[in-house]
Amino acid sequence: MRIAVFGASGRVGTKLVELVLANPGLDLVAALVSPGSRLVGSPVAGGSLEYRPAEAAMNTHNDVMIDFSTPSASLALQKDVGTKPIPMVIGTTGFSPEEQERLIEWSTHRPLLVSANFARGFEAFRLGAVEFAGRMPDAEASVGEIYHARKKNEPSGTSRLLARDLFEKRSRTMGFAAPEPPVSVRREGDTVGVNEVRFDMGSAELVMTYRVHALAAYAEGALAAAQWLVSRNGGPGLYSLADSLAGKG
């Protein structure tokens, strides 16, 4: 499978490049970075491939593109690719509602699989929390996170996703708008990622914790999603990580 990585100089993008290069069944055909990156023009891992910026005229022959960048860069990439039906896996977070609508528009041209968290096992964790919220809607839900000290001190895309899903599930089950789950944010050292969902039932409490030990977990999950998106060989559309785990075609 021929893979292009967009955001190749970022924390997860770097791990993606390493994993693709280490896997004999995968071929890295492009390592795309921002135009101002100091890596532009330098070789990737000492090989013949060079880091380069994405541009409308790029002619990268790939089976899938994996994007871990920023919302503005991600949407600019969609515009550069135009109407080409290249499947894309998007791990970029922080899209505004308007930007999400633009992604939906681009999904009419190609398959887009978008997730706030590709770490392996996270989706099962999320679905388990949502299922509990549906079975115990009276339990007060809250969300917590711990990430590295360099990350912005605001709720991550993962926490916003969890809070939204819990709110929607409890609201549907109870038949009226549930309280929105509060989100606590902590930043500590080099912590890769800890996500927590807490259900307070008064006389009892359930705490669900998902902990990522290495950045490779995000890269591995994104690669697995990319392999599914290519193997389904389907048309345009917007997909979630749950679709890939369920084998939805």
Image: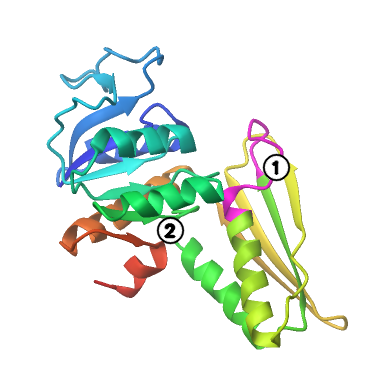
Which of these two is toward me, 218 or 109?
109
**In which quadrant of the rendered image does the C terminus lie?**
bottom left
For badge 1, the amino acid type reads Glu
For the residues labelled 1 and 2, the Cα–Cα distance comes to 23 Å
Mark 2 Cα within 10 Å, few/some/many (few <14, many 20+)?
some
Q: Which mark is residue 154?
A: 1
- Give the answer, above or below, for where 52 lies relative to 106: above
Residue drawn where x is 76% and y is 52% of the image: 184
In the image: residue 191, left or right of residue 200:
left
* Residue position marked by numbered label 2 in the rendering: 120
Q: Position of residue 92 (x, y in %)?
A: 46, 43
Crowding at dot 1, Cα within 10 Å, few <14 / some 14-19 / many 20+, comes out as few
Asked if residue 150 is among those painted magenta in the image, a careful observer would answer yes
Indicate the position of residue 71 as horizontal and vertical percent values: 48, 38
**Quarter occupied by residue 149:** top right
Residue type at the position of mark 2:
Arg
Q: Is residue 72 visible?
A: yes
Query: Between tags 1 and 2, which lies in front?
Result: 1
Report the span colored magenta: 147-159
* Horizontal and vertical percent position of residue 91: 43, 47
Q: Is residue 123 left or right of residue 171?
A: left
The main secondary structure of the magenta stretch is loop
